[in-house]
Amino acid sequence: MSTIKQWSKNRNIVHELIRKNIKTQYRNSILGVFWSVLNPLLNMLVMWLVFSQFFGQNDPLYPIYLLAGNIIFQFLRSSTTMSMTSIVNNRGLLTKVKIDQYLFPLSSTLSSLVNFGFSFLSLLIIMLFMQLIGGYSLFGYQILGILLMLPAFLLFQYGISLFLSAIYVFCRDIQHLYTVFLTLWTYITPVFFKLDRLDVNSFAYKILKLNPMYYFLTYFRDSVYNMCYLGGGMASWKMLGLLYLLGLVSIAIGYAVYLPLKKKFINYI
Amino acid sequence: MEEKETDYLLKIENLNMEFKMPALRFDTLKERMVNFFKGKRVKSRRLQVLDNINCEIKKGESLGVIGHNGAGKSTLLKIVAGIYRPTAGKVDLKGSVVLLNLGAGFDMEATAEENVYLNGAILGFSRKQMKKRFKSIIEFAELEDFVKMPLKNFSSGMVSRLGFAIAIDVHPDLLLVDEVLSVGDANFQKKCIEKINEMKKSGVSFMFVSHNIAQVKNLCENTLWIENSKVMGYGPSEEICKKYYDYCTGNRPESAKN
């Protein structure tokens, strides 16, 4: 089969898999797909309440800081955990029809992108609310930076997804290890805490600088509201370059692990 | 010259298939670690599933595949469909192929409708193309009332009806049928046989795994008989089926089951 035909066939398959993933998510609920927006919105309200009222940060924009960081990290969390089991969970398809295995982690990652879109919508609603009530200027052209950043972030996640889904075929308990690792990763990423209290020479700061998610979060926050609020231009181009570098490194590692293992999948799933 | 090129649809030469089966199978890291420290290594056992298979299907002709359970029939079909890669040998297929087996490529959590579109995509059809076929597929499968129901609530007969309906609607050059007809009720079986005959007339080839010898004799010009991964007979269906029948009813029915 020609490559173009194969490519358009795979695109159709991914399209159908995403559709199926999103639909199955809220199948038995009355509100159905509406939950996709409602769910993150309610979650955000809870976080807003808990963290801004009880933790009493002095920053009026702290709710937005927290929510923006959280949806980006949640995006990574859901895409990678869903991808990890995707090859094994689709064994019914893999052992009965000819289909490229990488399509499963790919469609899981892209399904999470759709969910991220819904969360992002909720974030915009809350930002709009803040702007109208609090009078902060939050919306500007800088928000286009998100479109520049997303391909890099998808590459980054897809690399991790390939790695995990291939390993999971042979070691099912990587699932538990990864859950623990994700908890650790959440805490060494500035999702909840702010950096201004950290000493630049401290050990914690050095760890932070080695954490790829720190850069994704910073760029995302800068684009969504921070640069506009501070009256600056687009978020740092240098950092954007770094994000693409991180994405490429991740995809290279992912494929280096996935490709040699691929042939053995069919005997293990 | 060209005539010779298009002479056959499928040609299998010296096909060998070996599975490396780990005698001890470790699925988790914990097991791997524990057994590593205990000094146990994963020993694989080689299992010969297909041994030197040769056969050919001419355009428009059909091939029956018979033999006892575990003989290697389904593995052969999966190799032709491209799911397994053979250990050695050549499979030369000139055209499109669809494998039809029980629960063929279905996601049991998804609805019948979603599975039709997903399967369509796997077979290379866009959503738009499948929309045109959707009605006739559901009609043939007689599942009009169950379109929005998850497949896990279907009976096995309903699932195989859906699989069959999709496969016949996409008109491949070669349709591999793996014992699906035995699940549907008598009415549906009759409908399928009629459809298969109709498709045969329009030039579709079949590779037909079945335990129903009468069906094989009716539908296939040639038959391949596999027993314990080896070819026991290959040739005109009438002759091979008779040999197989004699073999089964002979004085060694037990030893034939491995």
Image: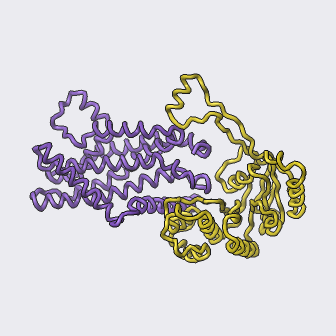
Residue A159 vs residue A130, the one in the foreground: A130
Q: Is residue B251 left or right of residue A224?
A: right
Where's residue B120, x and y in %? Answer: 56, 66
Residue A264 lies in what quarter of the image?
top right
In the rendered image, which quarter is residue B158 located in? bottom right
Where the N terminus of chain A falls, by quadrant? Answer: bottom right
Give the colour of chain A.
purple
Residue A239: where, in percent of width, then height? 29, 44
Looking at the image, which residue is at 51% across and 28% down?
A: B33
Label the yellow chain with its letter.
B
Q: Image quarter for residue B180? A: bottom right
Can residue A253 be seen here? Answer: yes
Q: Residue at x 66, y 68 (%)?
A: B184
x, y percent for residue A167: 50, 39
* A2 vs B72: above or below: below
Q: Residue B157, position in %: x, y?
A: 62, 66
Figure check: A194 above or below A110: above
Pick the quarter of the image with the C terminus of chain A. Answer: top right
In the rendered image of this protein, does residue B61 appear above or below residue A55? below
Q: Is residue A51 above or below residue A107?
A: above
Q: Is residue B2 visible?
A: no
B251 or B13, which lies in front?
B251
Give the camera-side residue of A180 and B179: B179
Q: How many marks?
A: 0
Q: Residue at x 54, y 72 (%)?
A: B129
Render colour scheme: by chain
Please tell me which residue is depicted at 41% across the width and 56% down the height of the picture.
A111
Q: Is residue B236 left or right of residue B134?
A: right
